[in-house]
Amino acid sequence: MSLYGIDLNIFEILVKQNYKKVYQIVYTYTKDKYISEDAVQQAFMIAYNKIHQLKDKDKFASWVISIAINEAKRMLNDKNNAPMITSITDIHLNQLPDSKEYDIELKEDIGNVLNKLKQKDMEILVFKYYADLTLQQIADLLGNKLSNTKVRLHRAKEAFRKLIDNDINENIGG
């Protein structure tokens, strides 16, 4: 069965392939399970209704993420509450399987360093290394050119490295 130019079975597959990633990214913005669920569901409904507007079907994931983030922002603004990404620990770093105490400490240390970054730096690192988006997907999501996205990622990584170096020097010297 086809409605809006896409077979329902195909769209269902797209939802199953992308739902978890979209939800986790939106949750980093909202820090609210219910708003995240609502925003993601709304995003997939919008995507289904507007699928005919998507020119490059390979960009479906980044397109839905963009819609979901916009929906989350709208919902948060409706609540007059916009926390956005402020804590990397909300991105489920602590829910990854741990085999050693060292792994837990390392994840906490990484989270602490990421929390010290400017929001735009944390955001691009999350998109690249947590959400595992390609540079082109990130560029599309942020509305930037690919070259600008590469520069922004490079700067974010440099800022991350400097913070790590500072933390290491403080721990050695202090």
Image (spheres, helix red, strand yellow):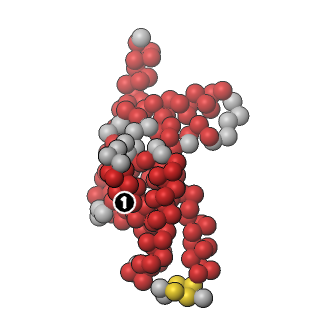
Residue 73 at x, y = what percent? 36, 54
- Which residue occupies the extreme front position in the image? 79
Residue 134 at x, y = what percent? 45, 61
- Which residue occupies the extreme top position in the image? 174
Mark 1 lies on residue: 70
Q: Nearer the viewer, residue 36 or 154?
A: 36
**Residue at (63%, 27%) from the top-left corner?**
102
- 151 vs 12, left or right, is left
Residue 6 at x, y = what percent? 52, 84
Residue 84 at x, y = what percent? 37, 45
Q: Which of 117 and 79 is in front in this view?
A: 79
Q: What residue type is labelled 1?
A: Asn
- Number of numbered discs on residues: 1
In the image, residue 50 sits, relative to residue 146, either above or below, namely: below
How crowded pointer 1 is (Cα within 10 Å; few <14, some 14-19, many 20+) is rated as: some
Q: Nearer the viewer, residue 43 or 10?
A: 43
In the image, residue 82 sits, relative to residue 41, either above or below, namely: above
Examine the rendering and report whether any part of residue 156 can be seen.
no
- Which residue occupies the extreme right position in the image? 99
- 89 vs 114, left or right, is right
Image quarter (top left, top right, bottom left or bottom right) of the N terminus: bottom right
**Residue at (39%, 60%) from the top-left corner?**
71
Examine the rendering and report whether any part of residue 145 can be seen.
yes
**Residue at (35%, 37%) from the top-left corner?**
117
Q: Which of 12 and 143 is in front in this view?
A: 12
Q: In which quarter of the image is residue 106?
A: top right
Q: Is disc 1 placed on a helix, strand or loop?
A: helix
**Residue at (29%, 62%) from the top-left corner?**
144
